[in-house]
Image (tube, rainbow, N blue to C red):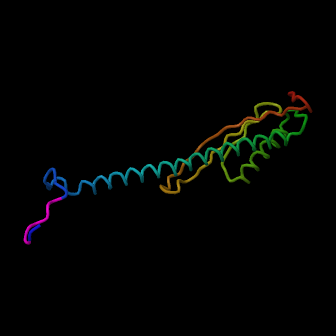
Amino acid sequence: MKSGQRPPRMFRHTRPHSSADRGSVALWVAVMAAAVLVTLVLIVDGGAKIRAGDRADIAATEAARAAVLAVGPRPSGSGMQARLAVAAAKAYLAKDGVQGTAVILGPGRVQVAVQATERGPISGYPFTVTRNATAALLVGVETGEQP
């Protein structure tokens, strides 16, 4: 190569830069970052809704079980046993910190409805979920039978 001569180009541009191309990568990154953020919020806050459902389901099941056990092994269907069952269910729900109701369906049968609320950790949106559980007292060692 002679002095004053430019070295040959190793790379050749196939098209000239235009002003329309400027910032196109930045726009793509901004759109993708927003999409990732929305997806993250949906996943994490969706987990809060699942936790609320699990909490309500467990509370309803355990409160129904507590109500049935409160009436004893030989439920008569009397008003006193019904009050005991409802009181046992409400005591369990209060201890667990959820809202709910208990309904006596018959001797040794209780249905509990529970509402549990969890807030999304990112959005702060409250997710309220309702679950129901029914328990029936079965008496017997090997095979449970209705009393």
Q: Is residue 98 above or below residue 107?
A: below
The residue lying at 69 percent from left, 42 percent from top is: 101
Secondary structure, magenta segment, majority class: loop
| Quarter holding residue 130 | top right
Q: Position of residue 126 (x, y in %)?
A: 53, 51
Residue furthest front as drawn: 1
Q: Position of residue 109 (x, y in %)?
A: 79, 33
Q: How many marks?
A: 0
The residue lying at 79 percent from left, 46 percent from top is: 88
Q: Which quarter of the rendered picture does the C terminus lie within?
A: top right
Q: Which quarter of the rendered picture does the N terminus lie within?
A: bottom left
The residue lying at 16 percent from left, 54 percent from top is: 13
**Magenta stretch, residue numbers:** 3-9
Q: Position of residue 82 (x, y in %)?
A: 81, 38
Assess whether residue 33 is covered by the magenta stretch: no
| Quarter holding residue 103 | top right
Side of 84 relative to 17 (left or right): right
Camera-side residue: 23 or 49? Answer: 23
